[in-house]
Image (cartoon, helix red, strand yellow):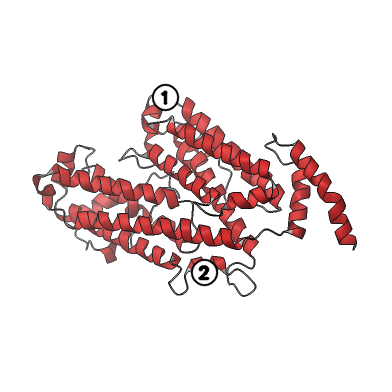
Amino acid sequence: MLKKAFFICVVPVALAFSFCSKSSDTASSSSRIMGALHNQFSVFNFAPLIKNISENFIYKNYVELEAKVNSLKTLTNELPDSCGGDNAKLVAIQDAWKSAFSALKIIEIVQIGPSGSYTTIDSWPANYVVNPPDTAKIETIIVGTETISETALSAKLDNEIGFPAIEYLLFDNGSGLTQATNICNSLTGRRKLYLQEAVKLLSTRITRVTLNWNPAFSGNFTTVLQTAGANNEFYKSEKEVVDTLIKQIVSIVEKVKDDKVGYPSGFSVDSGGVIRSTNVEAKYANLSMKAIRDNLNGLYAFYVGNDGPGISDYVRYYNISLDERIRSKMRQAQAKALEISDLKGDLLAGNTIKAKELNVITNELKILFTVELAGNLGSSFRPGLGDGDGD
């Protein structure tokens, strides 16, 4: 009886405080009260949210990524030496890489379970300071005598394989020339073989990850997420699953803010205030801003649920105002990213105004999740990584 009385008396007060602080982007006493109440009296049904995100966002997007990488593999396997004198063959492969890369950036937000091997597919986010790919090692292998095969490349470091290495081979001839004719002329012998085998390895690895998210596959991680409980090896409660999903959001927001925008623009602590225009992501294809926009689009779809229940429903259940502010801040970040067409070009010209604005917006978004959302839902959503810029 005492517990019920406490609940009845306190909830109206907590709700009153919550609505009085709608415009605040910092933790409040009301959010802490709501968080405490949430922990004790949570009644939100997590199951539809977890099912929708795991199947209709994670698995669905991996299926799309797998299909696009397989198309890339088909084209590279069929590529004749020097493109057979037809530059259009190279352009078609470049376009296939761009399409697959875009699909990858949508799903980059997910790095749990089978996706924990993300760096073997795309080494750039985890190694942005050393600026992958490692072109020196790639060139050494190409001019050397060691076997070039999918199996041999699978033993190489992440910076020598995956999307960045394939991008390098498709958009640079090895000597800094980027015209299709020059690149085609270079794609013969061991260089072409490296490209083909690297794509095969990429395809194999993505197929494996996709299979391990497939709800119909025995032992899949989708089912692991959906069956949280005492007997689950990974998650002892559905709330623990959702907290983990929210940590994925915090991680991608920090990567965009600190690594993809902050470091090359000279804003993050790691940058030391130095602008590094060549440290942008996808520098050979010059798709750094497209990658960021895809990250933000994936983030938004992940949060709202991609045509089904999402994290937004969970947040909205306890604090409608906070959910609306998070959605608004996400849309603001998406809109600002659209204002930057060429981050590398802007940085070369010393123009960092728009990049700084995007950096500020993503930092505000991070605070909404790590401070306000954590307070409201009684959780901690820090990803276990450094703050980057100390904010």
Q: Position of residue 14 (x, y in %)?
A: 80, 46
Q: Earlier in the sequence, mark 1 or mark 2?
A: 2
Nearer-the-camera pick, 282 or 161: 282
Q: Is residue 34 toward the left or the right of residue 188 in the image?
A: right
- Element carrying mark 2: helix
Taking depth in this image into account, of 267 and 93 the one nearest to the observer is 93
- Residue 94 in the figure: left or right of residue 298: left
Quadrant holding the C terminus: top right
Residue 77 picture quarter:
bottom left
> Which residue is identified by label 2?
223
Q: Residue at x 78, y 48 (%)?
A: 33
Q: Is residue 103 visible?
A: yes
Q: Is residue 163 above or below residue 113?
A: above
Residue at (89% x, 57% y) in the render: 5
Whole-number angstrom distance, CA of label 1 to CA of label 2: 49 Å
Q: Is residue 103 left or right of residue 246?
A: left
- Label 2 Cα neighbours within 10 Å, binned few <14 / some 14-19 / many ≥20: many
